[in-house]
């Protein structure tokens, strides 16, 4: 049966980068992928058109889709909206929560051609291949109660950091299984020296460990993990952590690879339905100028083919095509350096398309 892919361009550079990824998706369809594409509004675009960052119709289409490709959401235009529930980010968080996309995979892989583009020394990052497994539908992002209220004559802001054992266990299993398929090392990141919720996190990870005897489990406090990521990042294979720590550490890990413009992601639920998006944001400052790097979104399509559409061969072909384009010395502004050729967003997309045709 034909698969359904929902494309949600979103805001800022979102439409530009998804347009390039859709070119590749269409090439995959020509190469035999049996899929239908549909588009819908989300984020600020959803708010502007329908007064809601996650319009009913978009949510219904998302639920019916096998896979979703999302660009990015947000921008200064909506940052002043007093009603937080109308902010573009709520569209993204609402999709994650409603589809129960608790397992967020964020691979930080350094293409050898980009060793020079990293702000870290090439010998620190060359060969880097980390998989961050971030819990995505719980923790402080969703905990109740939350809010800003008047207490003793001043306003107080508060959020709740909460994880149930079952939530920790299911993300733990995703991470252990991922480690089994990779280098068999799993580092669980917490703040168990201070926060009870992460003491429980550590306890559950330890409890799971004997079921995965081939995986070596270690624990690290998040502050140390942030330091180790920039000090000696190659010590990591799979990292598992909660929602907020994962948000922060994955941006840091992204920079090791040269640019956050290179980092794709997958967000999966229990039945492998997935949302695929670049890890970067909507970059409103460069929107519409052809400066954005479409490779993270194109690589997100590869993850979609691998994890939700059962097409690993096409996924490999896209990844090979990206490698080839980098070999050719083509670079968007974020990864350009002397000796390379700077190209626009669509030139980069076209180059990947051409390389895909030959790959
Ligand atoms: C990410 C983003 C989102 C997050 C924002 C846009 C809500 O930073 O996907 O990492 O915090 O999860
Ligand atoms: Mg983030």
Image (cartoon, rainbow, N blue to C red):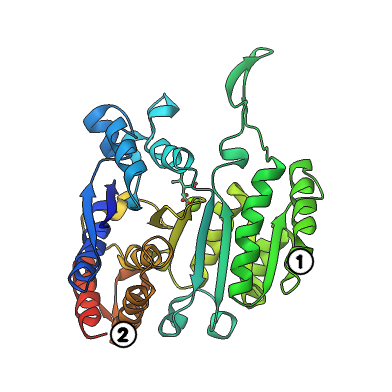
**What crowding class fits label 2: few (fewer than 14 Cα within 10 Å), some (14-19), or many (20 or more)?**
some
Label 1 SS: strand
Residue at the spot of label 2: 324
Q: Is residue 131 left or right of residue 313?
A: right
Position of 146 relative to 59 (above/below): above
- Extreme residue toward the top, this view: 153
N-terminal-most mark, 2 or 1: 1
Position of 330 relative to 152 (above/below): below
Percent of width and height locating residue 282: 34, 50
Label 2 SS: helix
Name the residue nearer the viewer: 200 or 178.
178
Percent of width and height locating residue 130: 57, 71
Kindly tell me whether mark 2's CB lies below 8 Å from ligand 1.
no
> Mark 2 to mark 1: distance in Å?
36 Å
Position of 310 relative to 172 (above/below): below
- Residue 150 picture quarter: top right
Percent of width and height locating residue 90: 42, 36
Question: Which quarter of the image is occupied by the N terminus?
Answer: bottom left
Q: Is residue 13 left or right of residue 99?
A: left
Kindly tell me whether mark 1's CB lies below 8 Å from ligand 1.
no
Residue at the spot of label 1: 218
């Amino acid at each position: 049966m034909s698969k359904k892919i929902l494309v949600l361009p979103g805001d800022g550079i979102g439409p530009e980068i998804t347009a390039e990824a859709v070119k590749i998706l269409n090439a995959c369809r020509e190469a035999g992928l049996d899929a239908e594409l549909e588009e819908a509004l989300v984020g600020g675009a959803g708010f502007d058109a329908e007064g809601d960052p996650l319009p009913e119709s978009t949510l219904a289409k998302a639920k019916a889709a096998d896979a979703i490709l999302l660009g990015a959401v947000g921008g200064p235009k909506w940052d002043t909206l007093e009603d937080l529930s109308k902010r573009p980010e709520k569209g993204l968080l609402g999709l994650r929560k409603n589809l129960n996309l608790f397992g967020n995979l964020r691979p930080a892989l350094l293409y050898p051609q980009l060793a020079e583009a990293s702000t870290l020394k090439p010998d620190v990052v060359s060969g880097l291949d980390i998989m961050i497994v971030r819990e995505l539908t719980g923790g402080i992002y969703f905990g109740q109660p939350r809010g800003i209220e008047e207490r003793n004559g001043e306003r107080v802001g508060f959020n709740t950091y909460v994880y149930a054992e079952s939530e920790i266990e299911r993300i733990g299993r995703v991470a252990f299984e991922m480690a089994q398929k990779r280098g068999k090392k799993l580092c669980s990141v917490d703040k168990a020296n201070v926060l009870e919720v992460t003491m429980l996190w550590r306890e559950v990870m330890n409890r799971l460990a004997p079921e995965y005897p081939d995986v070596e489990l270690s624990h690290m406090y998040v502050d140390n993990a942030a330091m180790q990521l920039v000090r000696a990042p190659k010590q990591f294979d799979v990292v598992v952590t909660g929602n907020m720590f994962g948000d922060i550490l994955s941006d840091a890990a992204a920079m090791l690879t040269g640019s956050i413009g290179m980092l794709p992601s997958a967000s999966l639920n229990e039945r492998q339905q997935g949302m695929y998006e670049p890890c970067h944001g909507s970059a409103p400052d460069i929107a519409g100028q052809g400066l954005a790097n479409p490779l993270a979104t194109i690589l997100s399509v590869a993850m979609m083919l691998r994890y939700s559409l059962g097409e690993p061969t096409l996924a490999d072909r896209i990844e090979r095509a990206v490698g080839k384009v980098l070999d050719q010395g083509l670079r968007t502004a974020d990864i350009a350096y002397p000796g390379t050729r700077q190209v626009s967003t669509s030139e980069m997309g076209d180059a990947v398309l051409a390389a895909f045709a030959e790959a």
